[in-house]
Image (spheres, grey):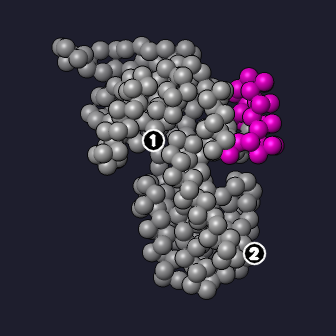
Amino acid sequence: VIGGGPAGLEAARVAAGRGHRVTIFERAAELGGTARCSSMTTPINGALVDYLVAAVTELGVTVLTSTDATPQLIDDGRFDRVIVATGAVRSRPDLPGADLDHVLTGDDLRALLTGDDPDVARRLPRWQQLALQAGRRTRAMSPSRIRTLSRQWMPIGKRVVVVGGGLVGIEIAEFLAERGRQVTVLEAGAYAATEMAHPRRWRTLHRAREHGVRVNVNASLLEVRPTSVVYQAPDAVSGATRRVTVAADHVIVATGVSADRSLADQLVAFGIDADVIGDAADVTYIEGAIRTGHDLAATL
């Protein structure tokens, strides 16, 4: 199983429970994938990851972290079945200024915490780089610790624009606003957080607004500038489209998520058949990712 996020862990758990000898390859230093990082804002995701990690450990699954599963490495292992659960990729919008250092995707945020991509950390001031390095060395950067420590400090500026008002964007906005950030959300659609069930959606949006989050719907990002962003939205009174500029020390992109089948394609080109599950196959939420992994593993 390549990828130690929820889909990969569930596939490994079910397969091992049915008597198969399973090996998990995970590029990061810890299992859990994006779900572990998202547990900063949604603690129940951390509980799910902890359960799955405990389950595969108890079942004797071989876990290789900090390991890049290349086609050659997989071929050398002579595995009978290969399951790719490498998750999704997150891209920046194709707009002026989207490549500026203070624009962060979900993958960038994860890299800041895990240290997987040193290039992301290099965008920060030197003292912030050292603080993050020290936290990782002392293992102080667990999601639960980050939730606590981030109330005192985190490498995110005072004024933040979150691009995308779906489930992820709203949860990030609420998390940041609780920690004293002035947050503006830009959602291109007519409604925010439509992926949430109604009671949770109402509660989450209410809490976000109580913390001062400004949620703008029908708002399309036009440009990112060094200290601001420009977007367009209909005027509340006339309905005419207008351009709006809002200050931003950081811009967090919570859109542009797509399935990452790149490794699966490399394996097939190498002559290795591979099944693709989870967000690597189709971007969805945890329920769908786990069900996909369970169904596949049940056929082994």
Quick one: SS at disc 1? helix
Q: Do tag 2 and tag 1 residues touch (Cβ < 8 Å)?
A: no
Q: Position of residue 64 (x, y in %)?
A: 74, 65
Badge 2: residue crowd in 10 Å (few <14, some 14–19, many ≥20)? few
Nearer the observer, 1 or 181: 181
Q: Is residue 232 above or below residue 112?
A: above
Badge 1: residue crowd in 10 Å (few <14, some 14–19, many ≥20)? some
Residue plotted at (75% across, 75% down): 76
Q: Position of residue 81 (x, y in %)?
A: 60, 78
Going by the image, does 51 lie left or right of 113?
left
Which mark is nearer the camera, 2 or 1?
A: 1
Name the residue beneath numbered marker 2.
76
**What range is drawn magenta here?**
119-142
Q: Quadrant of residue 74?
A: bottom right
Q: Is residue 267 visible?
A: no
Earlier sequence position, callout 2 versus callout 1: 2
Residue plotted at (68% across, 70% down): 57
What is the spatial separation of the Cα atoms under label 2 and label 1, in whole angstroms? 39 Å
Q: Which amino acid type corresponds to the residue marked 2 in the rendered image?
A: Asp
Q: Quadrant of residue 202?
A: top left
Name the residue beneath numbered marker 1.
168
Quadrant for the N terminus in the image? bottom right
Residue plotted at (81% across, 43% down): 137
Q: Which amino acid type corresponds to the residue marked 1 in the rendered image?
A: Val
Q: Is residue 261 above or below residue 192?
A: below
